Image (cartoon, grey):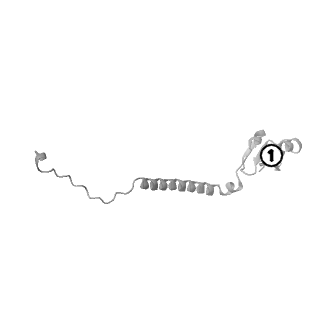
Amino acid sequence: FMVTFVCDVCGDTIKKNRVEKHCETKCKSAWVFTCLECGKAFEGYDYDKHTSCITEVEKYQGEFIKKMKEKKRQLKEEAKQVVAAEETKVADPPEVNKQPEEPKKAKKGLNAI
């Protein structure tokens, strides 16, 4: 989408590609243009560097979106940990109930001497 500015002198709303023409014809004293989307003011030709802006959703629901993205990241991390734990269980099967082996008794006889 095209970034739109407001002329701080006359208040006109101008698309980025029309700002220079606006300054040449209608409002020769214009020097500051404010982005309609994010509200940031640009002096002189700085407006030209403003190529993208926040979306309407980000503007009005920014904190909500940030929290949702963080929650999604946490869930992915937890899922990775669960998968890693499951893989560890498969690699090391649980011990079967084994009775401890008794030490072998030495044979009596000639070898015992």
Q: Is residue 83 left or right of residue 12?
A: left
At x 73% / y 51%, what residue is drawn?
37
At x 49% / y 55%, what residue is drawn?
83
Q: Residue furthest front?
A: 110
At x 82% / y 45%, what residue is drawn?
17
Percent from the top left, x then y, of residue 12?
83, 50
Amino acid on which the number 1 mark rests in the picture:
Lys
Q: Is residue 96 left or right of residue 36?
A: left
At x 81% / y 46%, what residue is drawn?
9
Q: Residue furthest top?
A: 45
Q: Which quadrant is the C terminus positioned in?
A: top left
Q: Is residue 67 above or below residue 16?
A: below
Q: Quadrant of residue 26?
A: top right
Query: As rendered, which of 31 and 79 lies closer to the eye?
Result: 79
Q: Is residue 45 left or right of residue 64?
A: right
Percent from the top left, x then y, of residue 53?
72, 48
Q: Which residue is disc 1 drawn over?
A: 16
Numbered disc 1: secondary structure:
helix
Query: As rendered, which of 74 and 35 lies closer to the eye?
Result: 74
Q: Residue furthest right?
A: 25
Q: How many marks?
A: 1
Crowd band around label 1 with a 10 angstrom C-alpha radius: few (<14), some (14–19), many (20+): some
